Image (tube, rainbow, N blue to C red):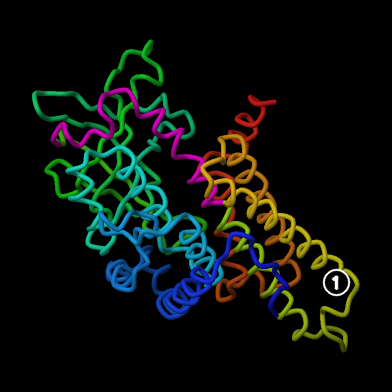
Amino acid sequence: MPLNIQRSSWMTEDLDDFRQLAKTFCQKELTPNQERWIAAKQVDRELWTKAGEVGLLALSIPEEYGGGGGTFAHEAVLYEEQARSGDGGWGVSVHNGIVAHYLLAYASEERKKEWLPKFASGEYVGAIGMTEPGTGSDLQGIKTRAVRQGDEYVINGAKTFITNGAHADLVVLAVKTDPDPEAGAKGLSLIAVPTDTPGFRRGRVLDKVGLRGQDTAELFFDDVRVPATNLLGDEEGQGFIQLMQQLPQERLIIAVTAVAGMEAAVEQTLAYTKERTAFGRPVFGFQNTKFKLAEAATEAAVARAFLDQCIERHLKGELDVQGAAMAKLWTTERVNKVVDDCVQLFGGYGYMMEYPIARAWADVRISRIFGGTSEIMKDIISRTL
């Protein structure tokens, strides 16, 4: 039962055509494989090369580096269709919208020409390593060290909760290049580490509450040596600034997925409550059901309007840290409420993992944590008041 979703102001005819491509790919390649990927705790490695073949990778990377030459709008369309397909396993938003853009913005020209075409083809899968076993939101507290020795950096440390960790061929790694506590944020740098480098090893693929088909893993670095030219930026100590520059897009991606997930949950629940009967009439016939779904549809419509405004600003280069934090905070808090209300209307079936609504309920919970917790978002917003 489709919602009457207003066409986004940033959509174009080109994006309509692209949406059909993305929708077809997601329905064919993602939806039928959910149970198998959940059991394996990762998607098929071949999914990445299939996506590369049809042009779904490196969408907003310039054509000169092998990318699609599109904009963030193309990325948003793909993530919406992925969410609507019921998939929580494919870490394409990290690969496309986050890691590829760190390389585009900060890697040397030589490295961009070497790595980005492989991101576009699916030969390389990208991951970003920030979180550590003892450090979450406080990036200044990371322990992973990179020490310059001649023309190389020697890296030692560990990362956890890394999306695409099992498949990654290249990890953008947050490291301390200056361990002096007085250095603070200026002691942080980003270095790209190919995973075929000696000393790199993968730990467990983690057993999560939701997003169970995603290869979220532990990564370890034991005297890993990489060329000094793998440093992102032209000097050490730029990592924190680089992260702050890129995090608004990461948070907007999370908001895109949240709103699409909200809309999908309402559509699924409308269909179910109009078919399912109780006490001789459809569940939708009860006032409580109608009112709950009226609230949920309104939540989704309001979130969509705000999201569209933020996407428009981002496409113009005008989305600031505060705006991205507000989008991430609002949409993730609302999707958790909406999906929980929808599960209630499914009754016992809403708790069965064979139903997409149950998987969605587990999947969306992390949205209030990753990319910066809701509490961190409130702190960021409060600084601008």
Expressed as whole percent of the image width and height from the top left, the position of residue 205 reads: 34, 54
User: Is 267 on the left-hand or right-hand side of 79?
Assistant: right
Which of 341/323 is in front? Answer: 323
Q: Is residue 60 above or below residue 313?
A: below
Expressed as whole percent of the image width and height from the top left, the position of residue 351 reads: 64, 69
User: In the figure, residue 220 lies in which quadrant?
Assistant: top left
Q: Which residue is mark 1?
A: 290
Q: Is residue 38 visible?
A: yes
Q: Quadrant of the N terminus?
A: bottom right
Which of 328/86 is in front? Answer: 328
For the point 73% across and 73% down, the residue is: 4
User: Is 65 on the left-hand or right-hand side of 272?
Assistant: left
Q: Is residue 346 visible?
A: no
Give the residue at the far top of this rendering.
182
Which of 254/350 is in front? Answer: 254
Q: Which residues are magenta?
A: 226-254
Query: What secondary structure is the stretch in magenta mostly built from?
Result: helix
User: Is 254 on the left-hand or right-hand side of 21?
Assistant: right
Q: Quadrant of the C terminus?
A: top right
Expressed as whole percent of the image width and height from the top left, the position of residue 326 reads: 64, 41
Q: Amino acid at mark 1?
A: Lys
The question of residue 208 being in magenta is answered with: no
Expressed as whole percent of the image width and height from the top left, the position of residue 187 reads: 33, 20
Give the residue at the far right of this rendering.
287
Q: Is residue 184 above or below residue 54?
A: above
The question of residue 232 being in magenta is answered with: yes
